[in-house]
Image (cartoon, helix red, strand yellow):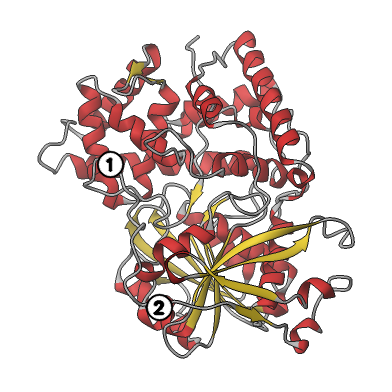
Amino acid sequence: MTARPLPVRPRFRGNGVRAAGALVLAMVLASCTLLDGGQQEQGTATAKADPSIVATAPEGLESFYSQEVVWEPCENGFQCAKVTVPLDYKKPDGGTIQIAALKAASTGKKSGTLLVNPGGPGASGYDFVKDAAGTHFSKPVRDGYDLVGFDPRGVKRSSPVTCMSDAERDAARAKIYALDTDAGLAAALADNKVIAAQCAEQTGPALGLIDTVSSAKDLDVLRAVVNDDKLNYLGYSYGTFLGSTYASLFPNNVGRMVLDGALDPSISNEELTSGQARAFEKAIRSYVADCLQEDGCPLSGTVDSGVQQIRDLIGAVQQTPRTAKDGRLVNATMFVSGLITPLYNDASWPALTQALDAAMTGDVSLMLRLADLGADRTSNGTYSSNSTFAFNAINCLDYPMVSDTAGMRAEQQRLMADSPTLGYFFAYGGTNCVDWPHKSVRTPAPVEYTGESSIVVIGTTGDPATPVEWATSLRKQLGNASLLTWRGEGHTAYGRANSCIGDAVDSYLVEGKVPADNTVC
């Protein structure tokens, strides 16, 4: 059997957060730009709770809803704060944790606050607003809203999941296991058991309490402490799951909510992985079709033959891992991780072409750089976030997973049928949770929403991470919702799609005008 590393785990990355710069070999994040001058220096401000909002607090949580939050000046003219929430909502009188938030103050007449989650699970909303407030959002939205990005519990600055050093992360990514064999699977499970124990020891009790339901309850505390009687919210990718969970828990508190790159809360982890495998296979074919029309494309012939050339290249790295210019060994999973990272944004396809061209001549350094970008590893060897650990920890709580040997091997066969190019590398996800110290706390089920405010759901026809069918399903489950569909490539739409999407969302957020259901742009 062929040796292979642990499975690729495509994350639900929000728009722009990990979009590779299309023409820059250094692969600078496309959305990471300095503010354009619209952000003004803000002094320290204390937000005192509105008594009418505190009155709506769930029983036992009044002290959290009534807390005074101090917004202090932080980098580049933003304001930052820590919001205290219960560690365990079932025991609100017990321990507490703090949620880190960053605010870009409105540049005009403020009408409210727009809370933002860019995806993951594990992505930093704090960083998203810091990096993209001046470029990602339209002037009407910036004028009308304070933008607040936050790190959900378990993420980066908010009681982060911590498991290992940067050097240990490098070593773990480079390992190879023959998962098709009993011995190889046992070795992988043994290593994962050690990692899980490290996560439990280094993170502490919070590790078992970072599920999405708990984060949705944090979101309502955040709504209250910014003194909004209704939640105005923009969620990308996994952020749509957080948003729909909130809508089910607090239907009367929903204001203007946009869910872009929708996740279907009713499907199992295995259905989710199969959906992604099919969508990424479709995205590869779209990329190849585009590449073949461009000068300098290293692929040749038909789309089928171009895809086969990519498969052959993956197979060659699988048989003989290669060494990058920095001396690091690139195994097949790292190579595939690099391959899929630019598929999240079609503006990054030229970067994939450059990486493939170099790899076909034996140099995998650019593909490794793309893989590092997806893993939040910087060029100096440090990791800028804990997103990988948070992703795994949150998913282990949110999803029961098939983790018996027979079940995982059967899933591998299904995934290889769904995606001949990538399915092999999406299998064995259950190895991540089988020895996790905390069991799942949720059973996937359709979301129920009874609120009066209409929610906007967005899907993209060529989305590789959240297939467009999931948006249709979420819209049906919510009931009181409107579906926008963008005919485009890449993950999510608002902020990078056409004016049809942008104008519809802006009119909804600023004026409350709900777009016509089933609008296609």
Image position of 163 with respect to 98: above or below: above
Q: Is residue 188 left or right of residue 500?
A: right
Decide: is 246 above or below 490. Answer: below
Residue type at mark 1: give it: Ala
At 63% from the left edge and 57% from the top edge, which residue is drawn? 152
Residue 461 sits in which quadrant?
Answer: bottom left
Q: CA distance from mark 1 to mark 2?
A: 35 Å
* Residue 373, percent from left and from top: 40, 40
Q: Residues within 10 Å of mark 1 (few under 14, many from 20)?
A: some
Q: Nearer the viewer, mark 1 or mark 2?
A: 1
- Mark 1 or mark 2, earlier in chain: 1
**Relative to 405, residue 484 above or below:** below
Question: Which residue is drawn at the image coordinates 36% and 58% (left, top)?
Answer: 31
Q: Is residue 434 visible?
A: no
- Residue 195, compared with residue 135, is above or below; it is above
Q: Disc number at residue 504? A: 2
| Quarter of the image that includes the C terminus | bottom left
Return the residue at label 1. 26
Residue 383: % across, % down: 48, 39
Is residue 111 visible from the viewing direction of this image? yes
Three-letter amino acid code of the residue under disc 2: Ala
Q: Which dot marks residue 225?
A: none
Pick the residue in front: 30 or 439.
30
**Residue at the (37%, 67%) spot, across then down:** 136
